[in-house]
Image (cartoon, grey):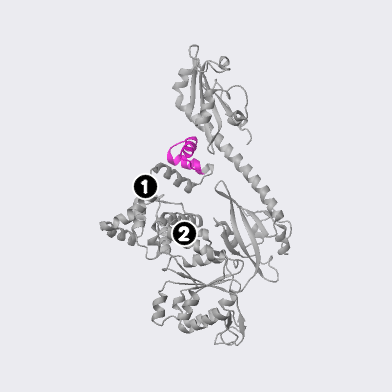
Amino acid sequence: MRDLTDDLIFLEEDELPAKVTVYDTEKSAEGTPGYPYNCSFFQEAAKTGYMCSVDITENNHPCEFCSENKGCKKGRILFYPVPFRNKIEKIVSLFVKRENLTEFESRRGMIEVLVNNIETSLISQMEKQESRDELNALKKEMSSLLELTTDSVLLIYKDGRIADFSQNLVKQFSTLNAHLIGRSVNSFITKRSWEVIQKTQEETTLILELNEEVRNYNNLIWKAIVRPVYNNKEIQSYLLKITGIREEKEVTMVQQLYSFNDIKGVSESIRSVKETAKRISEGNMTILLRGESGTGKEVFAQAIHGASHRSQAKFIAINCAAIPESLLESELFGYESGAFTGAQKKGKAGRFELANGGTLFLDEIGDMSLQLQAKLLRILQERKLERVGGTKSISVDVRIIAATHRNLEKMVADNKFREDLYYRLNVIPLTIPPLRNRKEDIPLLVDSFMKSISSSQNIQPKHLTEEALHALLNYRWPGNIRELRNVVEHFAHLEIGDLVTLHSLPDSLREYNKTVDKQADQLPLEQPILTKVYKEKDAYKNQIMSLLDTYGRHTDGKKIVAKKLGISLPTLYRKLKRYKIL
């Protein structure tokens, strides 16, 4: 890191009753001789992070063992350490002549403000320089990796300009030329696709549309693994690993798939299911996801697909309960020309064919009729299908992930679900826990939803009061994760201020909370969760961390946090060091 001392404008005695100088502590570490690096008070300030001062008079020589003490001027010396990244990088020194001490004390408050401003300026400069150094190093490292990789990789700045790319990208997509750097991504990716990329906070798999002039005769779209590149908690660019896919007529919209990173939770129940799902992702076995409505079964299905070797192929989903039985058969298996009145002349591929090589998610499988269950069983056994109105067998390579909220065992006993199909589907059952059984995850889920909503809809992030959190923890959540997201949407749009109070919540939730609070026997069950999550010993530390999460850990964000706390930026840095907040 370069020395920033020359960037300061020092104030001399004719402007203030003190001389201000800034020293770099790194020089002390290098063994720089002479004053002030060999001064014990300077070293104490650098070591402890606290201001040290010494008065030197004719009758007071606190530095009598210092080899430089005879050369020290008479007066007061103050050393103010400047903390940065849990280290003391700079020391601001004030020297006050003996004859100026009275004036110095009378103007002490104003001088403290001056010192704080100098410290803030130094910290800002160091952070900017650090960001520049890290970004340059990242660019060099990224360029080296792109030269070595055989993948089709594209690096895009957050403003939409092409930063770098691998040579294989140009080779694979012949419509692109080698002069990509500096061009706008919108010159070949649609505006809608770029907007989806910009909303990405974690690694995500997306299907992206190309502009008409860039598509080749195969009518390609891009499937990309998008990874945001962060620097000091801020997104600087986006790294895309791209493969070409032939575009089907049914795939006309940008498709955003969930990953395991999108499944939030610290509870043992959700972590256990998540770990099991990760372990079985790579295989080809059929998976049955069970759980109440709104628990996130399709999120798990997409995450499993994204972590499998089929991730480069399609993920096709169909809700068996949302489509009339008369249409479900043709939607699943497709149909030939003239199969029925209104059929397309060329026929149509069904969801099984569209998902060939990939994953087919059959949601609400328990609502499928017995007739279709028999046809589905045959496909699972033989891996072949016949379109409606056709006689030709079509081979399909599809992984099946089914889901239901129904009691299939009871349905089998009541002859409403085929027993043989049940055993075919129930190879690896995964039960997604309801939200009422994982309430310790509620604060994390609320925070995740709030960030997503505020980012996508340009809404100021909000924080829950303890009273509002208590109400959320008390509620039984019959609609599970889906209902919780709806509640966050509710108060995110309706609450004007930064704090979400009990009155910001929907009426139904408030009424339920009143009822629960009257039942004393239910309180001990929920209260420990609230205590565990929000009533930690150091509430001030939690407040700082919450504000940093809201406003960011970059310099501008920390300035806002300091202002909210009523302290200076250097004081905030000292507290970050004290509380070991990185």
Picture layout, residue 568 above or below residue 249: above
Q: Is residue 77 visible?
A: yes
* Gap between marks 2 and 1 measured at Cα: 23 Å
Q: Is residue 321 visible?
A: no
Classify mark 1: helix, strand or loop. loop
Question: Which residue is identified by label 1?
Answer: 535
Q: Position of residue 555 (x, y in %)?
A: 53, 41
Instruction: Describe residue 438's horizontal placement relative to residue 90 as left or right.
Output: left
Left or right of 527, for residue 552: right
Q: Position of residue 237 (x, y in %)?
A: 61, 52
- Of tags 2 and 1, the one toward the viewer is 2
Label 2 vs 1, first from the N-terminus: 2
**What type of secondary structure mainly makes up the magenta span?**
helix
Residue of label 2: 271
Type of amino acid under label 1: Lys
Q: As displayed, is residue 40 above or below residue 296?
A: above
- For the record, the magenta segment spans 557-582
Of residue 112 and residue 480, the one placed in the foreground of this image is: 480
| In magenta segment, residue 574 | yes
Which quarter of the figure has residue 221? Answer: bottom right
The residue that appears at 60% across and 40% down in the rendered structure is 130
- x and y percentages locating residue 100 in the rendered image: 49, 17
Amino acid type at mark 2: Arg
Residue 68 position by quadrant: top right
- Which sits in the foreground, 264 or 115? 264
